[in-house]
Image (tube, rainbow, N blue to C red):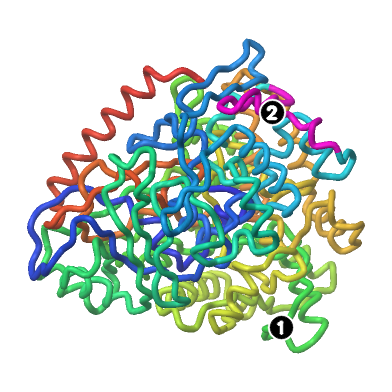
Amino acid sequence: MGAKKGWLAATFFAGTLLLAGCGSSKASNQKQVKTDHFNYVYVQDPDNFDYTVLAKQNNTDVVSNFEDGLLERNPYGQLTGDLAKSWSVSKDGKTYTYHLRSGVKWVDSEGNTHGTVKAQDFVTGLKHAVAAKSEQLYVVQNSIKGLNAYATGKTKDFSTVGVKALNATTVQYRLNKPETYWNSKLTYGVMYPINAQFLKQKGADFGKVTADGILYNGPYVLANFTSKSVLKYKANPGYWDKSHVYLKAVFDDGSNPDGLYKSFEKGNYTYARVYPGSAGYKTVLKQNKNNVLWTSQDSSVYNFTFNLNRQSYNDTAKKTDQQKADTRKAILNQNFRLAVQFAFNKADYNAQVNGKIGANKGLRNELTPPSFVSIGGKDYGTQLQEDMQNTGFSDIKLADGQDGTYQPTKAKQYFVKAKAELKDQGVSGPIHLDLPVDEKSSLLLNQAKSFKKSVESTLGKQNVIIDLQLLSDDKYNAATFNATTGKTSDFDISNGSGWTPDYDDPSTYLEIYNPVSGANLHTLGLDPTATAGGSASNAAAIKAVDFDQYSKLLAKAEAINTDTAARYKAFAKAEAWLLNSGIVIPTNSGGAGAIVSRIEPLSGPYAPSGLGAGRYKFLKVRENAVTTSEAKKARAEWLAKRKQIAEDMPTN
């Protein structure tokens, strides 16, 4: 999901798996299971409660439980009315009018009422998002009429922005052009309301990570937060839709993978990720053989990315400027990047988490999931596969759940080409690639070792060496997850990035790498040309990889507004270019992990884009654990319902 919200830390398993399991049955040694609680771990502290601004998952998964927007996702992924009870769209598709529910309360953490949600609160929210330099603003900045001009300072008059409170319960948005997927953007915090009086009262303290840092209109309020220890929510007693709020949620910090299962067995955790590659998995099978479930792949994608313009070397194995220069030239060489990609054994990498039995589960070979949208009744992935026929991927299958790009012979062929080209540039081997690793995460370390082994064994250590940089959690995050500019991204290659979609359109995956304005360019060591301040090295890197060609392909797709089939085909061409460039290596998705769970079948929201996957509204917990047969039956029913909804659902 959105902005950097979708840029997921690879260690953040909780957010991607919380709601994936379904079903229930008996499990062993269960003690005092509270079916009105959801208990699990969290990995990283939230550091911001300003829901119109924040974008990282450690924040959004928390505040999405505190606030409601105009629309929300139900358990089948449908966009249904949340604060909006109804809405309408103009004939030209550029004006959306939403009618709010009356009497929805703003409350503080103690349950005291601070008025009701009004249409003007949505105007306040968007204006504040601009003032606070929202990390999510890009999702709507070029959609809402006049917003870009206001955000870039071309006008100081917010009344020119296309958001208006027509009356106390009616808010209207005017768009620059039709967007068939506009409503799917409304689950994002940048579109949420803010109580103006409270905002003025709090001033700079609005969004502070304390119970009184925000007002609440959603299903939960913060009950307790102790850094690196406890996150506790309690149900909002004044919530307008409390009949669909079944749980309280408590999170405790944890790091031992096998410890998750032990806590589940004791009844302390609602579900637990289990790891077939770990020493404790035999115990899991002995006690819960019929309760181990494999969750489905979700819409997120985790990548390896090359740093095209590395500027920081706080942690590196390189000892000379010549080594740095040689690595830079190699990374800017397409044949070198593709050689590394084809030498990467993704199945073995994934097996470090899922074991050999689940090595292929969750593997992803595209940026946009194959079934994310359809074109003429066929998956998007089918079109992309066709567009790859004239590239180095012509003989590679892109379908999910298999390692399509691990091709050792092809890798060696590409490296021979790269070596010759680099020799002409004065480059001598071996090429050293720094890969940051969180030294405290045994799973991530094992995955990094797997990557190193497959690349070096295929291409030869005399040619390429993967230098694992073992870092503390803080240093690892600073170099990868928390880096916000190209300059602060401190690596040659990294597996610390990923994306979940902001809205229901392929552009949400592909525009993040647009060299002009991409929100995820920093994961490539770049900054958007629109804001890079004329950086010579930034411009040189973009030119070296011919990134402007990608920008032009995106522009062609963006120019198609109402013909969704033509639009999706155009985006598939852009993605084909990006995949063939080798700049980004799609590796795996969220989900597709082994769990044991007490989550009720078919409960919890399903959010293929935007916020929602981290919400506990609709979620139910049972006393007993899920069996594989129950999970299979429940998923079949869910898929049938989803199919029926798709057949009946209009475009907007």
Query: Which amino acid type is marked by label 1?
Result: Asn
> Closest to the observer: 401 or 244?
244
| Left or right: 67 as drawn, with respect to 283 | right
Measuring 37% from the left and 78% from the top, which residue is drawn there? 255
Mark 2 to mark 1: distance in Å? 48 Å
Query: Marks 1 and 2: in contact by CB < 8 Å?
Result: no
Q: Which mark is residue 8?
A: none
Q: In the rendered image, which residue does mark 2 sit on?
A: 164
Quadrant in which residue 323 is drawn: bottom right
Disc nearer the start of the sequence (2/1): 2
Residue positioned most to the top: 91
> Closest to the observer: 133 or 571?
133
* Range of magenta residues: 157-177
Q: Characterize the local packing of mark 2: few (<14), some (14-19) or many (20 or more) Cα atoms within 10 angstroms.
A: some
Residue 472 in the image: above or below residue 88? below
Location of residue 204 in the rendering, given as x and y in whole percent from the top left corner: 70, 62
> Closest to the observer: 233 or 581?
233
Q: Characterize the local packing of mark 1: few (<14), some (14-19) or many (20 or more) Cα atoms within 10 angstroms.
A: few
Location of residue 106 in the rendering, given as x and y in whole percent from the top left corner: 50, 46
Measuring 28% from the left and 40% from the top, which residue is drawn there? 243
- The answer to whether residue 454 is seen in the rendering is yes
Location of residue 293 in the rendering, given as x and y in whole percent from the top left corner: 22, 55
Q: In the rendered image, which residue does mark 1 sit on?
A: 314
Quadrant in which residue 270 is drawn: bottom left
Measuring 75% from the left and 29% from the top, which residue is drawn there? 145
| Left or right: 78 as drawn, with respect to 200 | left
Measuring 78% from the left and 57% from the top, which residue is drawn there? 527
Q: Is residue 134 magenta?
A: no
Q: Is residue 165 magenta?
A: yes
Residue 547 in the image: above or below residue 182? below
